Image: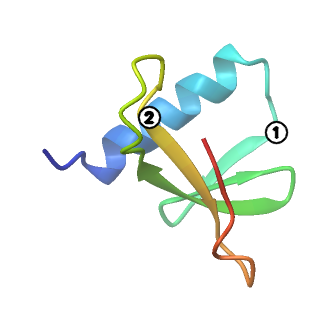
Amino acid sequence: MMIETSTLLTKARELAENAGIDNVAFDRDMLVMGGIRYVVAACKCGDSECDGVQLQIASSHAGASLQ
């Protein structure tokens, strides 16, 4: 099942708000937090406690990701 980008962005915004992070913005389907741009992707780890969202740094460090 493919999750739509808009759904992932909405989920990412909710997670940031629930965590008390207020310096979050979105620009061209990317999350910008603390001046760092992230691609929001569906997490496929399968962990039962996973929220289903994975952030991948959108820069020269493209291999880095946060779950």
From the top left corner, tell me how far across and down residue 66 is, in percent.
66, 48
Type of amino acid under label 2: Thr
Residue, x 51% and y 67% (percent of image)?
28
Q: Earlier in the sequence, mark 1 or mark 2?
A: 2
Residue, x 42% and y 44% (percent of image)?
43
Instruction: Determine the image quadrant of residue 15.
Output: top right
Looking at the rendered structure, the secondary structure element under dot 1 is: loop
From the top left corner, tell me how far across and down residue 49 is, in percent.
47, 17
Depth check: 26 or 54 in front?
54
Looking at the rendered structure, the secondary structure element under dot 2 is: helix
Left or right: 43 in relation to 55? left
* Residue at which label 2 appears: 10
- How far apart are the alpha carbons under marks 1 and 2? 15 Å
From the top left corner, tell me how far across and down residue 2 is, in percent.
18, 50
Left or right: 44 in relation to 14? left
Depth check: 46 or 36 in front?
46
From the top left corner, tell me how far across and down residue 4 is, in percent.
25, 49
Residue, x 46% and y 26% (percent of image)?
51
Give residue 44's mark: none
Within 10 Å of disc 1 (Cα), the crowding (few <14, some 14-19, many 20+) is few
Type of amino acid under label 1: Asn
* Residue at which label 1 appears: 23
**In the orientation shown, which residue stands out farthest toward the right?**
34
